């Protein structure tokens, strides 16, 4: 009997275990899980705070009991894997509640330990009413502890900061975002698009402090005082969202090689440098299929796709994960913000000769009363005419545009392919000239100059 052991039980881990069991029903599949819940949608946590989702338990896709009784997968909960011996094929673990230690023998091991929120080296960051948000238990604690709070300071204007700013504001809190760079979503969008989002946030009551670096967090008369290089900001609590770091230490200690950003290096079959050990999800690298290089972008979509292939391959298959383009999307009140592929700055670093074209279009026919604006920034390599990426901001249909270009990137499409694309049209869903088609046409004209 093939013993398949999975470390980590959220997106990648539970997907891997389920696919391993489906591929080889006779396999003995176990998951070691640090928390007391598994298979939950962490991306849905902001909507619990906002009130759209009633409670955190609704984010749980499958219970521990369901995994055991319906799928035959054993969950060892509240347990931390503390050591991997890749030569004897043993994982040592410890129950975090009782301290009891145990060992698990495996034939195939899948590491899906995820990532943790970064705690920056700020004086006072370990004080009361300062929170990180990454795990299910993080969410429960935050919701309980801020029940009667009226104001907050969010450190970081990335995905977590933006989504939680909207959630807190809609629950009636006063919200201030502090970001050390000069723009919202600095790793996602360009300066012009950031200004559009800035204005939208301010119009919705969010206070923005851009280009300010937090130096200390102090207490004064029951308030948290965030001291920056430009002054003081007061709030009842602080939420820190400055990025995540892969939980790869247990792998590194076992001699498993790490790659970019300290994530576990895997090949396109999700194998590590040990042929019987796989890794997937937020602890692992992925190949960027535009550059062919290692990339680290911890998102639920990648975790599920990598988990599926790692699970199947651990049970005897040999499927390949083709990689990612860096597709990401988020929402700030009425605006959706998306990106896939490379920005101009990234393209230059990778040796391309990029040109870009920004256009403002509408989402429906010009005469349709529900038309809304949409902004598109398309990036193309001047030499090869290959599409390199896109950034899109708008009130709707942003995801569709991102997905269209993500497919174009996978197929190494040229700008002419986007121009010649057979767009469908009906006034309630698009203008006769699709905004992405307009952006492509104008970009192609730029290349001829």
Image (cartoon, grey):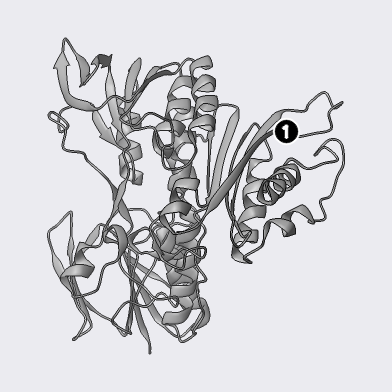
Q: Return the x and y of residue 128 as percentages of the image width and height.
A: 18, 27
Q: Return the x and y of residue 16 as percentages of the image width and height.
A: 44, 70
> Does residue 69 appear in this view?
no
Is residue 64 positioned above or below 2 on the image?
above
Q: Identify which residue, 443 or 328, lies in the foreground.
A: 443
**Label 1 Cα neighbours within 10 Å, binned few <14 / some 14-19 / many ≥20:** many
Q: Could you tell me which residue is drawn at 16 percent across and 37 percent down? A: 121
In this rendering, position of residue 381 left or right of residue 122: right
Is residue 311 positioned above or below 79 on the image?
below
The residue most toward the bottom is 1
Is residue 227 positioned above or below 50 on the image?
above
Is residue 333 positioned above or below 134 on the image?
above
The kind of secondary structure element at disc 1 is strand
Task: Tally the marks.
Answer: 1
Within the image, what quadrant is residue 75 found in?
bottom left
Q: Could you tell me which residue is drawn at 49 percent across and 39 percent down? A: 189
Q: Return the x and y of residue 11 as percentages of the image width and height.
A: 44, 58
- Circle 1 residue: 361
Quarter holding the N terminus? bottom left
């Amino acid at each position: 009997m093939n013993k398949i052991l999975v470390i980590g039980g959220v997106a990648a881990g539970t997907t891997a275990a389920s696919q391993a069991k489906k591929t080889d029903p006779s396999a003995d599949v176990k998951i070691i899980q640090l928390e007391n819940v598994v298979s939950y949608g962490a991306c849905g946590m902001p909507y619990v705070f906002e009130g759209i989702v009633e409670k955190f338990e609704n984010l749980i896709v499958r219970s521990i009991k369901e995994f055991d009784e319906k799928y035959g997968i054993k969950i060892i909960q509240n347990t931390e894997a503390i050591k991997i011996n890749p030569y004897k094929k043993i994982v040592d673990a410890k129950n975090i509640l009782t301290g009891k230690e145990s060992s698990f023998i495996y034939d195939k091991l899948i590491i899906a330990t995820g990532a943790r929120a970064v705690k920056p080296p700020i004086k006072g960051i370990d004080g009361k009413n300062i929170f990180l948000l990454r795990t299910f238990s993080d969410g429960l604690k935050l919701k309980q502890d801020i029940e009667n709070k009226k104001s907050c300071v969010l450190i970081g204007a990335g995905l977590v900061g933006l989504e939680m700013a909207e959630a807190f504001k809609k629950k009636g809190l006063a919200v201030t975002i502090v970001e050390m760079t000069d723009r919202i979503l600095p790793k996602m969008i360009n300066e012009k698009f950031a200004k559009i989002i800035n204005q939208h946030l301010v119009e919705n009551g969010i206070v923005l402090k851009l280009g300010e670096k937090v130096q200390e967090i102090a207490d004064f008369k029951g308030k948290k005082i965030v001291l920056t290089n430009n002054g003081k900001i007061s709030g009842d609590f602080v939420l820190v969202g400055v990025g995540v770091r892969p939980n790869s230490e247990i792998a590194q200690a076992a001699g498993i090689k790490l790659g970019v950003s300290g994530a576990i290096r895997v090949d396109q079959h999700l194998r590590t440098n040990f042929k019987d050990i796989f890794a997937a999800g937020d602890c692992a690298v992925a190949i960027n299929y535009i550059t062919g290089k290692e990339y680290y972008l911890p998102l639920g979509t990648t975790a599920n796709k990598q988990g599926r292939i790692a699970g199947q391959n651990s049970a005897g298959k040999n499927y390949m994960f083709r990689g990612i383009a860096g597709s990401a999307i988020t929402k700030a009140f009425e605006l959706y913000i998306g990106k896939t592929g490379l920005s101009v700055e990234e393209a230059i670093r990778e040796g391309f000769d990029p040109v870009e074209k920004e256009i403002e279009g509408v989402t429906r026919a010009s005469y349709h009363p529900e038309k809304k604006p949409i902004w598109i920034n398309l990036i193309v390599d001047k030499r090869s005419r290959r599409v390199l990426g896109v950034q899109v901001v708008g009130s709707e249909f942003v995801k569709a545009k991102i997905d269209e270009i993500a497919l174009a990137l996978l197929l190494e499409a040229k700008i002419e392919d986007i121009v010649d694309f057979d767009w469908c049209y009906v006034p309630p869903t698009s203008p006769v000239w699709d905004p992405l088609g307009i952006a492509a046409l104008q970009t192609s004209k730029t290349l001829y100059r």
